[in-house]
Amino acid sequence: MAFQSPLIAIPKKTTQDVDWTNPIRSVIAHSYGEDPNNYTEECSVLQRCRQDAVRGAGSDQTARDLLYKYFGQLELLELRFAEIKVAFPWNDAFTEKLTTQTSLAFEKASIIHLISSVLSSLAQSPSRSDPEGLKRAYSNTRSSAGMLTYINENFLHAPSTDLSREVVHLLIGIMMAQATEIFTEKLVEEKKAPGLVARSANSCAATYNTVVDEMKDFQGKGVFDRNWLYILQIKAKLFGSLAQYYRSVADSASGKHGAALIRLKVADTLIQEAQRQANSFNYTFIPSSTPTLPHDAATSLHEITKAHATLCAEAKDQAQKDNDLIYHEVLPSEASLPPIDKLPAAAPITIQEIYGNPGVTKLIGPDIFIRLVPLAVHESASVYSEEKAKVVRGEVERVEISEGEIRAGLEHLGLPGQVANWRKLAEDDVEGGDGTDVDLSISVKQLAEEISRSGSIERELRELEAERGKCEREFRELSGMLDNESRECERMRAKYTPQFTQSPSGPQTANFRSNITNNLSALSSAASSDSHLLSLWNSIQSEVNLLSSGVSGVERAAAQVAAGKQNAPQADQGISLLDLQDDVAPKNGLDNKEKEELKKAITEATEKLERLGKIRRERDDVLKDLKEKVQNDDVSSLLLLNRRSQNVEPQLFASELEKFRPYQGRLAAAVQASQSIIQELEMLVRQVEKGKGIRELQRGNKDRAKRVREWERKLEQAGQGYNEIRAGLGKGLSYYESLDRVIQDLRREVKGFVSHRESERNRLVGEIETRQRLGGSPAPPLPPSSTASRGLEERLAALSVGNSPLVPQPPRSISTSTPGFPPPPPQVSTPNYPPPPPQQKPSNPYDFSNLSSVPSAYSTSSPVSSQPPPQRQGSYGSPSYSSYAPPPQQQQQNQQASNPYPPPPPAPAARSQPPQTYGSYAPSTSNGYGSQSPSYPAPPSQGYASPPPQPTYPSQPPPQNYPSQPPPQQYPQQPQQSYQPPPAQSQGSYYPAPPSRPNYTSPPPPPPQQQQQYPAYAPPPSGYQSPPPQQQPQQQQQPGYGYSGYGYPNAPGQGQSQGQGGYGYR
């Protein structure tokens, strides 16, 4: 056809811009409880998508795609924001009336109407002479009808005329009539059968007639353009004439020439009417007034009707002539003609089909608000995830059970190791089953490698023992230095009394001695720890030596153990072939028949094991693929699309879970195949073990394996003990290293103290000897009895409460040329001691002949004051001595007297005690004291404060037993040494505790800044006053040496109780 039949396009709806952002932000904040600022970009994308789709929408494919995308996003948006309220203004497509609604359904219906308009325009524009153009026109008209059908089926109570059911139904009829027209044109162009063309044309004419009847109802309402009515009327008559014409051709071909002639006459009549209307329309049509029609619509219809009228007239004249001259058939009436059948009308393309197209789905793209998932969808997705998890758990459990059965079966059958043994037996390698080639466990191999790299620990054990002995010797040397200094001090005191004023060293060395004692006790505990390590090493030394030989040495030993020896050889022992020959019992080999059967069994077992390995690998791969498939499966979009459907989840879940059915089937097949192979292997092993020779060899192999396993357990226990010893050695050596630092610091302090005391003593001795040379020979000493009485009188005189100042007595004349010793002090009242024994001949308290055999005396007294205590006169041979101080009244009188020592700290008054021997040991079996010394009487009704505890200076070897004494009174004293000794040990001490000193009473302390004079001694003839007291140098307090990291508590100086020492190795 030279001219193309014009098609009607649906007018487009128009709209204005709307604000999506604020309503969406409000819904997100109130309904979802999320921050709207997180979705600002999504809101802007949606806003821009609407503007691109509806603003100046064209009639090309780009406009159609933008509308497709926007409507798809609206569908997804409605699933999340069904309650959103946005004002959507739309103008009616026919009346131009503005309609505004806040319903999202109104926006969707308007967009669908707009899509239908664009599709009708696309069907109108292309040339249908091209097959592709004709195909696109046919598809677009059907798609337009499908869009309009969706409006009528899903949107009720239309707010505008163009969306009303009647108007939409009329538009659907027009689109379907035009689609049938395009199909008829295709049939005519392709010269299909006249009967088929007649049926299609008759269907098109009937559709147009229906539409014309419906449109007449809208006449005068100003809805449709009247040119549409002209077009529809012309096309109804045109296609009616076309149907009669092609039916006449079909009748003429079938020999019905009379009926064909009548149909040609009817066709000519219809086309003449259509031509007349087309001529009128051609004169009245103004293209600009009807934009929904092509500009050449009138001309095309005029030419089409004119051409068809000419065709019908010629065919009618020819048929009339043929009937008159040839056929002479009786012409039937028009009413008697059978009606022409109608070809079934083409169905509209529904919106589901349109959006189910992958191209359209790709145009829509991902959901703009994909991050915002409704709670109901989350819940449904969780239910589906649980269903998927059930599937995965079931398959994983099945695979694990199958794998466990496979491993248990292979271990029970001894495969694949049993196949190797069979192969050795088949090759007459009988010795191979006797244990000469034993497979050690991985743990034993690792243990042997570790111990061989670490080396032996005997050297470290010897080093530990040497370090302990070294520390003990050094502590004993320090104790001997203190004993020698104390012995020298007392020797000088006995020689130059009373001029020798150096203070006793006992109180000043108390902390040194306590430190040494505590450290020796700690060494005793450390020795017990060392002995435990040594005993543990002796118990595992042979096994450790074997492990230290490396893996090869252990394997050789394992071979001998497997061969039947009771004990494994040492690492340095070689394997004797004679021993092996004795231990190995003679074995009988297999006969040829058994060997052949065994070789077949080996081949079959190897094949089955390889097949089993392939099945296991394939099963694991399938399970891995199933897990990945389940992990990546997401049905949130499907659940979102079906959100408004009721009870759709069970069916949806069942259909989605069908995707995993192939994986489940493959796993089930793999499990079944593995079970079958295990059963076959079991039958094969049972068959092989029925042989007599195989049975005997298998029994021997099991016995050897049992012996090797027990031997390996012993090696593992030895490895644990080795690690324990290693840990204990590290702690022990670290402890002795820290103790060595303590010893060095303590040695430096002790040497400084001894050196200072020696220099001070030399100075005092020099001064005394100078005074003696200048003052002449002193008087001989008085008898002991008179000396004791004079000393008693002087002390009683010192207790006078008078206010007169104390006048020092002149020096007594001495008849001898040697310095005299002081008289023994009187017996004083001391607590907790029995009355003195009967009077015996007094012994010399300064007899130092036995000092060389005196062991070290360890003082356990608390630290003394930073100032030395006052000098006490009396015997220094007793275990401890008390000091004497005048009463307070007499101290007031002695303000100007010279006193080299500060007063003792105050103490509460002591109760009356039995007298105590002072100056020598009392001959008592309870305390072991050997002699009695002169004693001082108790002071008259005067309370005395106990001075700081003093060290013991025995004049004979210390007693072995000591009386039970109350604990000495504690006084606030200032520590004067910088070491915190390790805690004394309550158990396992090297040495017994030093004897406790009795608690003596003394007068109350004098007021501060006062000095005390000893009234028992007169000043030397030259009037020489005793020098001021030597201030003991303050030692910087240093942090204590804590050994808690090695199993010891803190040192006693830190305020904690003394406990068991020793470093921990566990």
Image: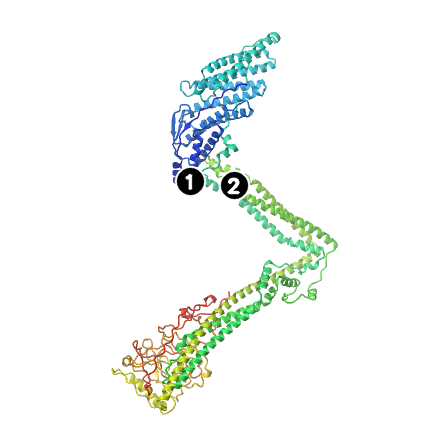
Secondary structure category for the residue under label 1: helix
Indicate the amino acid at tag 1. Answer: Tyr
Q: How far apart are marks 2 and 1 (CA)?
A: 26 Å
Judged from this view, the residue extending furthest toward the left is 803
Name the side, left or right, on which 795 lies relative to 846.
Answer: left
- Quarter of the image with the N terminus in it: top right
> 989 or 232, which is in the foreground?
232
Secondary structure category for the residue under label 2: loop
Of marks 2 and 1, the one in the foreground: 1
Residue 493, horizontal then vertical, whole percent: 39, 84
Name the side, left or right, on which 880 lies relative to 659.
Answer: left
- The residue at 30%/76% (across/down) is 1009
Tag of residue 624:
none
Judged from this view, the residue extending furthest toward the right is 592
Q: Is residue 986 visible?
A: no
> 412 or 295, which is in the foreground?
295
Where 344 falls versus 812 (above or below)?
A: above
Residue 178, horizontal then vertical, whole percent: 50, 22
User: Quadrant location of residue 884?
Assistant: bottom left
Q: Is residue 1022 visible?
A: yes
Indicate the amino acid at tag 2. Answer: Asp
User: Quadrant location of residue 458?
Assistant: bottom right
Name the side, left or right, on which 996 lies relative to 669.
Answer: left
Mark 1 highlights which residue? Answer: 39
- The residue at 60%/51% (across/down) is 407
Where 4 falls versus 361 (above or below)?
A: above
Tag of residue 633:
2
